[in-house]
Amino acid sequence: HQQELKLLKGTKAITKNGVEMEINANIGHPEDVDLALENDADGIGLFRSEFLYMESNQFPSEEEQFIAYKTVLERMGGKRVIIRTLDLGADKQVPYLNLPHEENPALGLRAIRICLDRQDLFLTQLRALIRASAYGKLAIMFPMIISVDEVRQIKGLVEKVKNDLTKEKIPFDPHFEIGIMIETPASVMLSDELAKEVDFFSIGTNDLTQYTLAVDRMNHSISKLFDSRHPAVLRMIEMAAQSAKKAGIWVGICGESAADTSLTEFYVKIGVRELSVTPSAVLELRRAVQQIDIK
Ligand code: PEP
Ligand code: MG
């Protein structure tokens, strides 16, 4: 079986009826690029940047972050690398951030909420990211979005960083893409408006399932209820995909259920064009796409 999958390296994920999908890898550390390349991923669909903050006992400097992002971009050699900004809080805590104790951390100060609250930290990460854009094909993605206002604030900060770098004569690629994760029911309901603000959507089915079904993704006693194939979740995904299509932007999926091959045909049909999965699942998924034939 493994031998058979190896033969798919160098081939593309195209359905029998000619729809081309991008099959990317999710990584959580620059070293994981080895696995992405070994499994012939088309790019990186989700680079979780939390490792930088979790492995340190103070906030990582712009330079440290820049080097990590640049390394991944260079090693991917011009293939798209989607880096997600800080997604701490909830299950991922670091002591030096001094976040308040919360009764409901999954509904608390996490991800983009921390970044918009502590803009100094956010601007440091944005500078490191945008500087790294000079070394490959970067896309930046923002987690846990619930409003158009958040996206406008983010875009304002991105513009500020671009202006600063231009003034300082520091090189960057002005054409990098900006996208948001669709992982809250609010972002799905507003997806028609959000789609006008960004270049792409990436659907985070882990959190989207948690928040749609009101089922804590960390709670083992209700893990049977955590179902990314629940019809409510599938309708959410379809609605976001339709909004993306209408606005002419691309849509991908980077949560665990991107790798669920029993859903691949559904994803293709509703217009999803990128799937990002753990590196070891890339070739299996490529094969699943190649077997699809939509009449
Ligand atoms: C998700 O929520 O589906 C996702 C991809 O992000 P994370 O698992 O890091 O929350
Ligand atoms: Mg998430």
Image: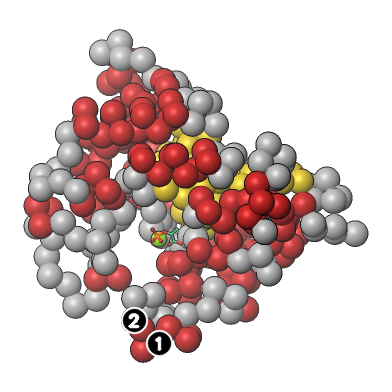
Q: Does the rendering let one see residue 46?
A: no
* Residue under pointer 1: 222
Q: Is residue 80 left or right of residue 105?
A: right
Q: Tell me which amino acid carries mark 2.
A: Asn
Q: Are marks 2 and 1 in contact (CB under 8 Å)?
A: yes
- Judge left or right: residue 140 versus residue 240: left
Nearest to the observer: residue 21 or residue 101: 21
Amino acid carrying mark 1 in the image = Ile
Q: Is mark 2 within 8 Å of ligand 1?
A: no
At a point 24% along the width and 44% down the height, the residue shown is 52
The relative height of residue 211 versus residue 176 in the rendered view (above or below) is below
Residue 174 in the image: x percent, y percent?
45, 22
Residue at the bottom extreme of this rendering:
221
Q: Nearer the viewer, residue 225 or 173?
A: 225
| Label 1 packing within 10 angstroms: few (<14), some (14-19), many (20+) | few
Residue at 49% in and 61% down: 255
Residue at 36%, 28% (x, y): give it: 70
For the point 63% across and 71% down, which residue is it? 235
Residue 9, percent from left and from top: 66, 41
> Is residue 227 left or right of 235 when viewed as pictured?
left
Q: Quadrant of ligand 1?
A: bottom left
The quarter of the image holding the C terminus is bottom right
Q: Secondary structure at mark 1?
A: helix
Q: Image quadrant for the N terminus?
A: bottom right
